Image (cartoon, coloured by chain):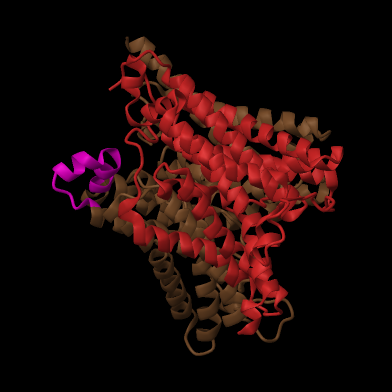
Chain colours: A red, B brown
Amino acid sequence: MDAFLSQTFLTALIFGAVTAGVPLLLAGLGEQISEKAGVLNIGIEGMMLMGAYVGFVVAFESGSFWLGFIGGAGGGMAVALIMALLCVRLAMNQIVIGIALTLGVEGLTALLHHFQFARSYPRLDAVPVLALPGLDGIPVLGPALFQHHPLVYLGVLLVPLLGWLYRQSAVGLNLEAAGNSPAALDASGVSVVQTRSAAVLATGALAGLGGAYMAEVGAGLFIPFMTGGAGFIAIVLAMLARGRPLWVLLGALLFGVSLALTTALQVTGVDVPTDVVQMLPFAMVILVLVLFARHSVLPPALGLPYIRGDR
Amino acid sequence: MSVIAESPPRGAWLGGVARIALPVLLALVVGGLILLALEKNPLEYYAFVVERGLLSWAGLQESITRSAPLLLIAAGLIVAFRAGIWNLGVDGQFLLSAVAAAALAPALAPVLPDWLTLTLSCLLAFAIGALWSVVPALLKARFGINEIITSLMMSFLGISFANVLVKLVFRDPGTTVPQTLTLPVEDRLARLFGSTVNCGVIIAVLAVLLVHLMMTRTAFGLKLQVVGANPRAAVHAGLPVGRLTVATFALSAGLAGLAGAVEVVGVLGTIRADWNPAYGLLVVPLVFLARFNGPAVIAFVFCFAVLQIGGESAARRLGVPHFYVLVLVGLLLLFLAVVEYLDHRRRASRGA
């Protein structure tokens, strides 16, 4: 039992939880933007995966993690652009297009990876970290929370920023209106199509960034299908967060812990079959949904395309 | 979903053909361009796929055999989609049921007659699949929670759980690579006319046709269609929407489970750890392409099986990995929606 409470174990667990949680945080915050605007973005899994692939390749070729992150965000946005065009502009079925994009990206990235690297899986160098001076000396929590790549801190800063945006700014109010009452937004002279398209693109950028972090930092390499449902977990996070960014952060950390448990247990020498641990996050999603199902709230116009004058 | 399910107006036969042929053609062309960009000859690839998957006797038998699980999954999706329910958890339902069948069949085979062993295995698989859909079904029926997410989550959970079962519970102690006990070839589903095709494909074709008749010709099917077309109207019409949702999910998932059983007792005889063919989402576009019509589904699934079998050969011979099939499927679904949209708009503008 001592092993479980040792400093190394706790540090490894929390550090791993942050590393595993950041992609979920970014993607979850992204999905939240889409859902607020009334678009159920099922394609987010594909956007993450594209971000992971592009992010890895750019970082691998250029040697720069930052260029990789920018590339990853761009990759996610490219997929989001198709979604915005087809689902928002042309009002096609969001679910069908979302599945199509996810399947297509899964195949495409695996195919490209195969032609580029054959069967080898080259690794990136260790990620440069920014130790926050003063905070990184705290026992256990210091090395676990404050020795990460700067993107992690930026991701966390995004939480209050988005919270402010949703409550205080015109942009946030427009987003909310696009999901709650698109016709009213239209009547007030703001384009629903533009608002929703911007939201979907922002989702793509954040999801791509999350995917890129997963590949560049979390794994250090790209493996086909590596997102393995993280995008769908992000959707659940956004659903349960009821529009509040802080809840996405807490949820992402919680799922991060369950994902990090394998590695942390291996540090202590406890051998748990990986398949058992892999069940944890999904079992937790189901449990959370069963317990809090009645509390999840989604905008009334979610999933419905907006066509002016259509009833 | 009704946008896609809409049947073409009478007399618009040509339009109907175009609505099916155009997405397929576009997917093959754009897919071909991707191959071209990767410096592979798309015509050579497609010719190879047809030759190996359809024109060679061995390939044809494999394609027909592969159709069986795909058809059973498609039958399940027809039920769900017609009732307006997105059962996207097929992979988990399929795999868990397959493991259940793989655990039961070799245990019963030495003591029971084959027909009973096979029947019991299939029934168990159906039940396990159905059981795995209860949570998403109840969450949808009770709280209106989106079943896409919940069924997907259950699917991921099921896939890992199936692996745990293979590695820790039902592991054959006599093998180095973790796998379940093997069902001897002579105890598996009977083969047809001296070929390698087993009778699973007959079960599958019957299932699709029965499901088609059930949905289009029976009161139960009509009720499900009403729920699918307009759940609120269904409530007002006094239909027990909650119970129908659970029943639809159970039937859909049960058929996916049966697909797993047929694959095990018909072809594989055992489940290896980490085996997951991920058929589920691949079948979705085919069912849409067929507009939930049973006989059309049979045709498209067979074509897809040819593509899969041919594609697997091509991976070995031409160096185009089978991921390419996934790209084609994604493109197909994308263009299906685009063509549908264009057609819808053309008709709307003509009507106005």
Residue B321 as seen in the image, left or right of residue B1:
right
Residue found 74% across the figure and 80% down from its top: B176
Q: Is residue A34 visible?
A: yes
Q: Which segment did they paint magenta?
A: B222-241
Residue B208 as seen in the image, left or right of residue B174:
left
Q: Position of residue B91 (x, y in %)?
A: 52, 58
Location of the N terminus of chain B by quadrant is: top left
A274 or B214: nearer the viewer: A274
Residue B274 as seen in the image, left or right of residue A305:
right
Q: Position of residue B287 (x, y in %)?
A: 47, 43
Q: Relative to residue A14, is residue A190 depicted above or below?
A: above
Q: Quadrant of residue A58?
A: top right
A211 or B180: nearer the viewer: A211
Q: Relative to residue A166, is residue B107 depicted above or below?
A: below
Residue A41 as seen in the image, left or right of residue A289:
right
Location of the C terminus of chain B by quadrant is: top left
Q: Position of residue B16 (x, y in %)?
A: 44, 26
Residue found 36% across the figure and 63% down from its top: B134
Q: Quadrant of residue A218?
A: bottom right
Residue found 62% across the figure and 78% down from its top: A4
| Main SS, magenta residues | helix
